Amino acid sequence: MASNPGARKPQLSFWQIWNMCFGFLGIQFGFALQNANVSRIFQTLGAEMDSLPGLWIAAPLTGLVVQPIIGYLSDRTWTGLGRRRPYFLVGAVLSSIALLFMPDSPTLWIAAGLLWVLDASINISMEPFRAFVGDQLPVSQRAKGYAMQSFFIGIGSVIASMLPWMLEKWGVANTADAGQVPDTVRYAFYAGAGVLLGAITWTVLRTREYPPDALHAYDEAAPLDRAPLQLARATRFGLLWLGIGALGLALVALQGLPRELYLLGALLAAYGIALLALNVVGPDNGFAQVMTDIYAMPTAMRRLAIVQFFSWFALFAMWIYTTAAVTSVYYGSTDTASAAYNTGANWVGVLFAAYNGFAALAAIAIPAMASRLGLRMSHLVNVSLGGLGLASLPFMPNEDWLLLSMAGVGFAWASILSLPYALLSDSVPARKMGVYMGIFNFFIVIPQLVAVATLGYLLKHLFADDPSKILVLGGASMVVAGLCVLRVPEPAAHAA
């Protein structure tokens, strides 16, 4: 197809959008099983509660590395299956294999290693799905497309999160010998492997992609508003961040601070080294192009980074500590082999299913809300509801009332998975949609790494080993995210 600047992508039908987003049901099925059960698996295999954030480090670190690489590669890929779909399929196969092996891990270190494999594989599929919506839909339909992804995320998560609880109701054993994962969790992971592979295969077979020349002709984004990164500036910033990181590492060592804080210093130093490395790689090198793209990111993306930081810090705190908080506050047990603990852990699965169910309902309403209130105000309302819901978790009359807390969290989850991407995709050129969606993942990963580095320390030294206080902190963080979104430019197509 010849280049045709100014051309507009044709709108897609409901069922075309449905097919292109259906694979996210499988991705989230695996992701929800991970979120609801990995802390339980780790504790069952002997992990102490304050070590859980460190064991979870696999999830954010793999995203930090994998998503920009996959985004960069998929921007430059064209095969018989298209641009993004080969990555959907490879990630699905690898994720399914990891799900099959995870619950049968004989030791804690093997379970932690399999979490690295699982999360990396899910990221291989997930990153191109975000770019896929931007590729296929015109600006006017992107909020609808990302909301459809949120709908499938909600549906997949409801079933996956409730699966151990449902299996127990069907007579599957929910307790096991010390150090053994119950059959309810094992069978749920086996089922998840099949669902993930099947849903992504459906999207691969039922969709098509624009060839590169057609996609570029339909580009609706404004040019990037920053000049390319110059080597002299990169060197100055590289030395600055390397020095700050080295100082942080020295302070942790000299002051005897928790070893998890080494992670923050190492990340800052690594960023400085990456900038300095631009002096020794050619400008056409893929690494150099990604670093330049980071520097040249659009204004909307830079401001959304702050929104994402507070949102995902809150979510990671919830995923790590809800099981520990609910089982201790409402079931009075921290013994992972006890019936009370495992009953409470299954109820957490139901709660996670509930917030994802509410998210699926919220996803239906979000396009209309965005049309009426605009993207920014809609996001503020939704994440504020989530913050209130998360902070209320330790204070309800009994465990049944926690479903009300999950209603607020569900609205926030649906919004976090859709509206920031709608705000971002309108400002990103089509030729760089994949790499910028991958770079945008930094602002999901970095707050999770901060959580890993700080939450265990806060739990022990500030919150007296009370995990429920971590949830209150997460609720406050989510409200801050909502206030920060007001600084993000509102795309003209979505302005209220």
Image (cartoon, helix red, strand yellow):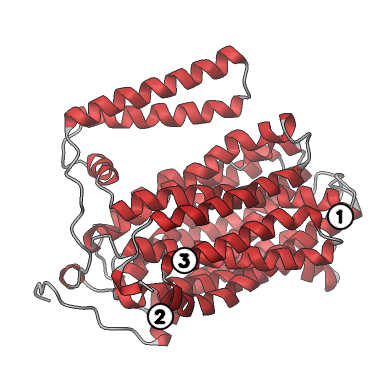
Q: Mark 1 = which residue?
A: 330
Q: Are marks 1 and 3 in contact (CB under 8 Å)?
A: no
The residue that mark 2 highlights is 17
Could you say whether the residue bearing mark 2 is in a helix, strand or loop? helix
x, y percent for residue 428: 27, 60
Coordinates of residue 61 in the picture (x, y in percent): 49, 42
**Residue shown at the point (24%, 78%) measured from the top left:** 9
User: What amino acid does circle 2 point to?
Assistant: Ile
Q: What residue type is labelled 1?
A: Tyr
Q: In which quarter of the image is residue 412?
A: bottom right
Image side of residue 133 versus residue 225, left or right: right
Q: How busy is the neighbourhood of tag 3: few (under 14 within 10 Å), some, or many (20 plus)?
A: some
Q: What element carries label 3?
A: helix
Residue 377 disc label? 3
Looking at the rendering, which quadrant does residue 426 occupy? Answer: bottom left
Residue 283 visible here: yes
Look at the picture and state if 122 lies above or below 294.
below
In the image shown, does 96 or 283 lie closer to the viewer? 283
**In this orientation, which residue lies closer to the viewer: 46 or 39?**
39
